[in-house]
Image (cartoon, grey):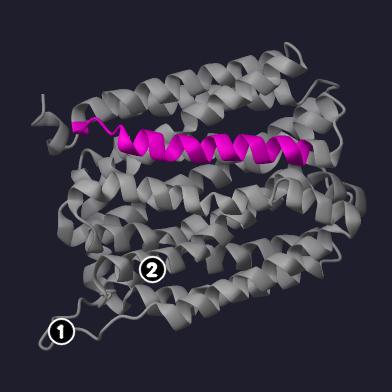
Amino acid sequence: MTAPTRGASGAWTALLLLSTGFLMSQAFRTIAAIMAAPLQAELQLSPQQLGVFAAAYHFAFGGLQLFMGMGIDLHGLRRTVLTASPLMALGAAVSALATGFPMLVAGQVLIGIGSAPAFLVCTIYVARHFAPERYTVVSSLILAVGGIGMVLTGSPLAWLIEATSWRMGFWVLAGCALLSWLAIALGVHEPGPAAGARRESLGQALRTFGALCRLPHTAGIVALALVSYGAFITLRGLWLGPLLMQRHGWSLVAAGNLAVLLTVVSLISLPLFGRADPGPRRRRRWMLWGSAVAALCFVGLAANCGMWLDVVLMLAFMMLSGYGTLQYPDVKDAYEPAVIGRAMALFTMALFMGVALMQWATGAIAQAAQARGLDPFGPVFGAIAVLLALGALAFRLLPQPASVRGDQ
């Protein structure tokens, strides 16, 4: 595991360098909101294809989390992230050169594979190198740092696309991904395994994952993970631009400006919720209330009560979105330290498979609504509201971890 030799400052330096990969993954996963209109215009993408384009990254990202968790536990943080992350730049280059939908999706899959360990290495690094009582605060700060990537895919990306093209957006992101790889390669170091350390086999690692899945409280954690982040990214990373441009007639740059504002609000929300973490039992209550109010925000968006109410509802949702940072200490407290790497991998896989499924499903819903002459955003946001409510209900009713039961 990574072990900085310069005390607290060394730990922070290594963590911030690792977080540049997470920043890039945040940028890549939210490009569809701004690129949707130019992609549809040049490549003639349908709403369903747009949903598949956005989801392809997340299917690849989420599907590899278990293997990235095993790679981190077996081979270390640095080797895992440096092996995978060059594919971010390669995928961005393929996307920039795309002449049709299949090539565009292939590029997104490569980007998703390259991004797969980006946040996982940060969460595991925090668990290994910072005091347990600081885990929530430090994790929320890293989430906020990574969120700078979403800021870059607001106004800056919109301006770049209007001045050049969406292809140049991918080329610039490819260059930034290479710089992140270089920074991690030069600035993050880790020792070899301790003398006599026992290395776990691939079969043993897979059996550990199976054991995690069989624990009763895993189902509830996964149920909420499948919808919580998915709702956030499906709004901010896919439908925000089309909503503003098609429902309310905004320009691409105006939509990008609001995307930046919403992102900044969400970044402020993360450390606020992180510092306010109330502990295992009350934390879960906060997560339930957060999911319920988020669902109501999407009900309001589905109702189409006017431009300014839509903006207010999106701002309210972003102010609330920081409750998602409480899921990370919830997972950490629910499992033994020896398997925390794979528990985080399982949780992260659920988060991003949920994003992929929600983006794919809402793309299909929008396509069906449009074919019937309906406003596609009503059914899309109504479906997100229902999924959030179902995920929260499962989280509440399914078995709770011992850390919560013991607090009751």
In this view, the mark in front (2 or 1): 2
Is 144 placed left or right of 152 in the picture?
left
At 65% from the left and 73% from the top, the residue drawn is 89
**Above or below, comparing residue 215 to residue 64 in the picture:** above
Q: Is 187 within the magenta? A: no
At 84% from the left and 44% from the top, the residue drawn is 37
Image quadrant containing the C terminus: top left
Task: Examine the rendering and report whether any part of residue 269 can be seen.
Answer: yes
Mark 2 falls on what kind of element? Answer: helix
Q: CA distance from mark 2 to mark 1?
A: 23 Å
At 74% from the left and 52% from the top, the residue drawn is 156
**Above or below, comparing residue 259 to residue 193 in the picture:** above
Q: Nearer the viewer, residue 366 or 303?
A: 303
Residue 194 is tagged as 1
Mark 1 falls on what kind of element? Answer: loop
Residue 357 in picture, x, y percent from top left: 56, 43
How many other residues sit within 10 Å of disc 1, few (<14), some (14-19) or many (≥20)? few
Q: Is 257 within the magenta? A: yes
Is 376 placed left or right of 347 in the picture?
right
The amino acid marked with disc number 1 is Ala
Give the residue number, with chain letter if any, for mark 2: 13
First in sequence: mark 2 or mark 1? 2
Is 132 placed left or right of 294 in the picture?
left
Residue 10 is tagged as none
**What span is in magenta?**
255-280
Is 69 placed left or right of 43 in the picture?
left
| Main secondary structure found in the magenta portion | helix
Q: Quadrant of residue 60?
A: bottom right
Residue 151 in picture, x, y percent from top left: 64, 48
